[in-house]
């Protein structure tokens, strides 16, 4: 997928004018591209729309306008975009407000190395935690990791052909496999490879 460039970003003034509409589009994309795995884990498969939305919001909240600072943020956010042979997902581990996040995380230590997807009859592909992007606490009850799922050419062709997609976690204390993923999600993920 083509990387985002400074020219793709809206100025602060222009973004404020269009923000509601753009957030609505990005939220719809996020909903389509998010896979819930049990009650504590979700995978948001990033694309240009979701990444640009996150970046514009970060620039807005931090009031970043200097080109060098914008470029620095842009370079970091481009690491979230899918590539020629892999999908990238933000893995979010969350808990109910009455639960303690550190206890939930400790109980599921290493869970970010146990997330997988499966396309059709192909073997499961486990996500690799991206060492260039540190995990981060989003808020008190969520922590996020960035995962890469490296796919073979056959897997990509099967995804584009509409083969069934599954996802899961293979962890001793969180062993869950989803039902068949919605077709609209599979279709959206397959489009990532036609735009690369």
Image (spheres, helix red, strand yellow):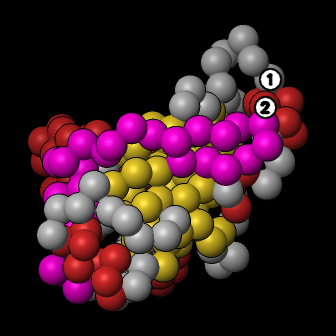
Task: List the residue tagged with mark 2.
Answer: 104
Task: Work out whether 131 lies above or below 98.
Answer: below
Q: Is residue 101 visible?
A: yes
Task: Work out whether 159 lies above or below 85.
Answer: above
Q: Is residue 172 magenta?
A: yes
Observer-nearest residue: 121 or 193? 121
Q: Quadrant of the C terminus?
A: bottom left
Q: Position of residue 66 (x, y in %)?
A: 43, 75
Task: List the residue tagged with mark 1.
Answer: 100
Observer-nearest residue: 73 or 91? 91
| Residue drawn 66% across the image and 16% down it | 97
| Residue drawn 31% across the image and 83% down it | 154
Of marks 1 and 2, the one in the foreground: 2
Q: Position of residue 188 (x, y in %)?
A: 20, 58
Residue lying farthest to the front in this orientation: 121
| Residue drawn 73% across the image and 47% down it | 171
Element class at badge 2: helix
Q: Quadrant of residue 143?
A: top right
**Image check: 55 left or right of 133?**
left
Q: Residues within 10 Å of mark 2 (few under 14, many from 20)?
A: some
Cα gap from disc 1 to disc 2, whole angstroms = 6 Å
Which span of residues is magenta-colored?
168-196
Q: Quadrant of the N terminus?
A: bottom left
Observer-nearest residue: 88 or 169? 169
| Residue drawn 87% across the image and 39% down it | 106
Task: Work out whether 85 lies above or below 162.
Answer: below
Q: Is residue 62 visible?
A: no
CB-based contact (under 8 Å), mark 1 and mark 2 = yes
User: Mark on residue 3?
Assistant: none
Observer-nearest residue: 45 or 164? 164
Q: Position of residue 44 (x, y in %)?
A: 42, 51
Q: Position of residue 70 (x, y in %)?
A: 43, 74
């Amino acid at each position: 997928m083509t990387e985002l460039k400074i020219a793709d970003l809206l100025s602060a003034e222009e973004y404020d004018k269009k923000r509601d509409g753009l957030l609505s589009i990005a939220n719809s994309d996020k909903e389509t591209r998010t896979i819930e795995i049990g009650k504590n884990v979700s995978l948001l498969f990033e694309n240009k729309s979701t990444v640009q939305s996150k970046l514009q919001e970060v620039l807005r909240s931090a009031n970043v306008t200097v080109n060098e600072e914008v470029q620095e943020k842009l370079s970091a956010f481009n690491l979230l975009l899918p590539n020629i042979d892999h999908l990238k997902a933000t893995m979010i581990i969350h808990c109910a407000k009455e639960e303690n996040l550190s206890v939930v995380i400790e109980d599921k230590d290493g869970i970010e190395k146990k997330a997988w997807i499966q396309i059709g009859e192909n073997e499961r592909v486990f996500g690799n935690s991206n060492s260039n992007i540190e995990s981060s606490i989003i808020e008190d009850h969520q922590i996020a990791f960035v995962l890469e799922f490296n796919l073979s050419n056959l897997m990509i062709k099967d995804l584009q052909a509409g083969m069934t997609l599954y996802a899961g976690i293979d962890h001793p204390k969180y062993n869950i496999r989803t039902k068949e993923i919605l077709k609209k999600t599979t279709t959206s993920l397959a489009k990532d490879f036609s735009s690369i």
